[in-house]
Image (spheres, rainbow, N blue to C red):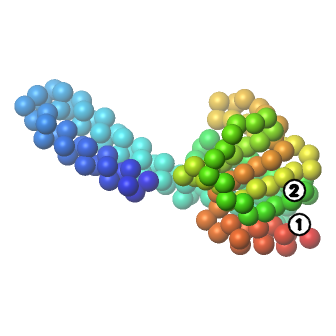
Amino acid sequence: MAGFGFVCLVETVAMSVLLRDWPAVHAAVLFLDVYTIVFVVALHASSVVRPHVLDVERGALRIRRYVHVDLCVPLERIASVRRELRMTHERADGELNVEVGAQTTVTLELTEPVTHVTFLGRRRQVRVVRFHADDADGLVRALGRARV
């Protein structure tokens, strides 16, 4: 995200230089460029502020990504958990891939499906959840201890 934000900032400066002779177009493009930079910062902030949460007291793993994914998986429904680095993901029924940078590091297989509600309200049942975690080994160990 930092690289993308930097590229947007360079593009803003370049467009300001190129459009300096056309004030109306310059103002419109500057507004859009600043909006894009704010949007990139907001995307990064939503990733940092809304991480995955393992709540042992409630017995659930909450998998989140931006505002698009917020899935609560009860610990008793987890059949197996493993660290598995995957770089490609095919769309399949019953599977949810929450990738970051086109990769996932943890795979959950569930005993019974959980309902995932998409950002626009569509419901689907998922039995396999793949997601990225910064400390995948630590999460797998913590899930193993929490399920016992």
Most foreground residue, 51 or 126:
126
Q: Which quadrant holds the C terminus?
A: bottom right
Q: Residue at x 87, y 51 (%)?
A: 110
Q: Residue at x 77, y 42 (%)?
A: 95
Image position, residue 33 (x, y; %) = 29, 39
Q: State the image quarter where residue 2 is shown.
A: bottom left
Q: Which mark is residue 93?
A: none
Image position, residue 139 (x, y; %) = 73, 68
Left or right: where 138 falls relative to 99: right
Say which label, 1 or 2, has the lower sequence index. 2
The number of numbered badges drawn on the structure is 2
Q: Residue at x 38, y 46 (%)?
A: 38
Q: Secondary structure at mark 2?
A: strand
- Res 55 seen here: no
- Res 30 seen here: yes
Q: Residue at x 57, y 49 (%)?
A: 102
Image position, residue 114 (x, y; %) = 84, 43
Q: Which mark is residue 147?
A: 1
Vertical placement of 106 versus 117: above or below? below
Pointers 1 and 2 in contact (C-beta within 8 Å): yes
Return the residue at label 2. Answer: 78
Give the amino acid type for the residue marked by disc 1 in the picture: Arg
Left or right: where 21 falls relative to 9: left
Give the amino acid type for the residue marked by disc 2 in the picture: Ile
Gap between marks 1 and 2 measured at Cα: 8 Å
Image position, residue 87 (x, y; %) = 62, 52
* Residue that sits furthest to the left in the current view: 21
User: Label 1 crowding class (10 Å Cα cut-off): few <14, some 14-19, many 20+?
Assistant: some
User: Label 2 crowding class (10 Å Cα cut-off): few <14, some 14-19, many 20+?
Assistant: many
